[in-house]
Image: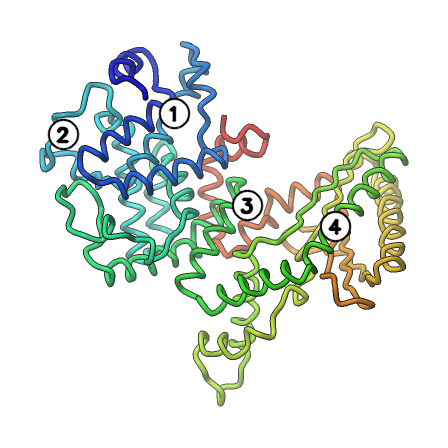
Amino acid sequence: MIRKECIDMDLITRPPNLAISVQRARQFYTHFNAPPLYEHCHEVFQRASREGMIDGGPLKRFKDDEEGSKLASFHSTVAESMLYHVVDADKLIGGSVDLSFLKEGHPLLDPVVRAELEVFSRLTELDRQGAPTSEYASVLNNGPAPRALLTKLADYAVTHNTEDRTPGHISHHQSPLFRMYSSQADAAKRLKMDAKAGERIYASVAELFGFPLLAGDILKHAYRINHQVIHDHVVGMIEKERAEGRLGATQTIARRLARVLKRTLRDSGFNVEVVQRLEKHEGKIMRKFYKQLAQRHKALPTSYTPSLEEFIAENIREYSLSSINDPVALKVIIDGFNGKQIDALPDADNARVIKAALDMVTVQMEILQIVEGYVPTYTLLRKNNGYTAHHLDAKPTLHDNTLPLEVQVKTRAWDDVASHGKAAHYYYLGGDPEFIELVSSAYHDIIYRKQNGDNGR
């Protein structure tokens, strides 16, 4: 137990460490007899910690200089915003709620934290109005980029479903300080709008910020609410593939192939990175199936006009993990050859080196065909958005105990375009391109730090 005296002393000289912030938040919600709200906020806080959105290191290693103060302030502000994001920011002013029990230094007395909670409340209003992205842009690109957007991402990735909205969330609470649902019907209505915002906005932003698992979870929760037929089909489909061993068998093959490719290319002078993506996220599979079915629905003759959801229900069972090329995937990034950067080589040399690497990968895919019964199909993809990659899409033909496996071969520059440029997944996931551009510019520092491996630290 952290003694109260320690909390007060710590607040005088430096931002509190995360353990103190959590303890103080628990005391705050206990004061208002609102433990379910604390539990939800703490879960959001924990998810953000796991993703690296917040980090206690700069708070523990606090240095009283510009950089140390900036880092500590960033993580403290994000953490406190997450721990109090259910607070209705409008009720913090004007004396509508008695907050006289708060001690000096409490985050709800901090104008910076209050400003973040105001932004979070405004974003929530926009979500539930189905507002256009232009209205979000005016909130997020009005001075310093609000950290409340990070809170939104973590909140959306934590479960958003009506069943989990306990009576502690759906009631007229004794204090008007919190945003509450008035009834189960009110919760269902608002959560549907939340889910639409997750699909339209927050999944793409999470991908942009470098949180692909977060993006997938946002989509999964959104589909659970607004496209339950697809959600249930994909979840059941993956459970079946795991139980019957096809997913595990394919993952084993991919791991072995990754080791062989890395060793072969390095032994031949290549500086190479082999990235394994051993399971496509359920939420992103749902998105993929939805988009394909929506395209099919759009192409229907006018004489046959079921609603999109009816059409999905009729046809979703045609789709399985074998319907996509990449339920399991490897990305081979060739960065250098014999000490030289491949992307800096003259065009002719660059082409020869890339072909040599591709030939080595192709040989291993041919061996895979002999040993495992996979038949690879080669494609050089060049898209208008700048995406470039050699794809080898391998499908099992001799056995029914494995799934498709995709191998991509890219240079570092090609991968940068696919990961952070116009061909990035945050565009593919369906985000408004202009809005994504605005967020990318406004939140450049956060995105830069995440891309460079320090998760915003």
Instruction: Measure the C-alpha gap from mark 3 to mark 4.
Output: 23 Å
User: In this figure, which residue is indicated by the disc labeled 3?
Assistant: 212
User: In this figure, which residue is indicated by the disc labeled 4?
Assistant: 252
Q: Is residue 397 left or right of residue 309?
A: right
| Lower position in the chain sequence, tag 3 or tag 1 | 1
Q: In this view, does 342 lie to the left or right of 197?
A: right
Instruction: Measure the C-alpha gap from mark 2 to mark 3.
Output: 39 Å
| Lower position in the chain sequence, tag 4 or tag 1 | 1
User: In this figure, which residue is indicated by the disc labeled 2?
Assistant: 99
User: In this figure, which residue is indicated by the disc labeled 1?
Assistant: 18
Depth check: give the residue in front, 22 or 146: 22
Q: In which quarter of the image is residue 13?
A: top left
**Residue 101: image location, x then y, percent:** 14, 25
| Lower position in the chain sequence, tag 2 or tag 4 | 2
**Helix, strand or loop for disc 4:** helix
**Helix, strand or loop for disc 3:** helix
> Disc 3 or disc 4, which is closer to the eye?
4
Instruction: Measure the C-alpha gap from mark 3 to mark 1.
Output: 25 Å
Residue at 67 percent across and 51 percent down: it is: 387
Instruction: Quadrant for the N terminus, please.
Output: top left
Depth check: give the residue in front, 161 or 323: 161
| Lower position in the chain sequence, tag 1 or tag 2 | 1
Depth check: give the residue in front, 238 or 219: 238
Check whether the beta carbons of the residues at disc 3 and disc 1 lie within 8 A of each other: no
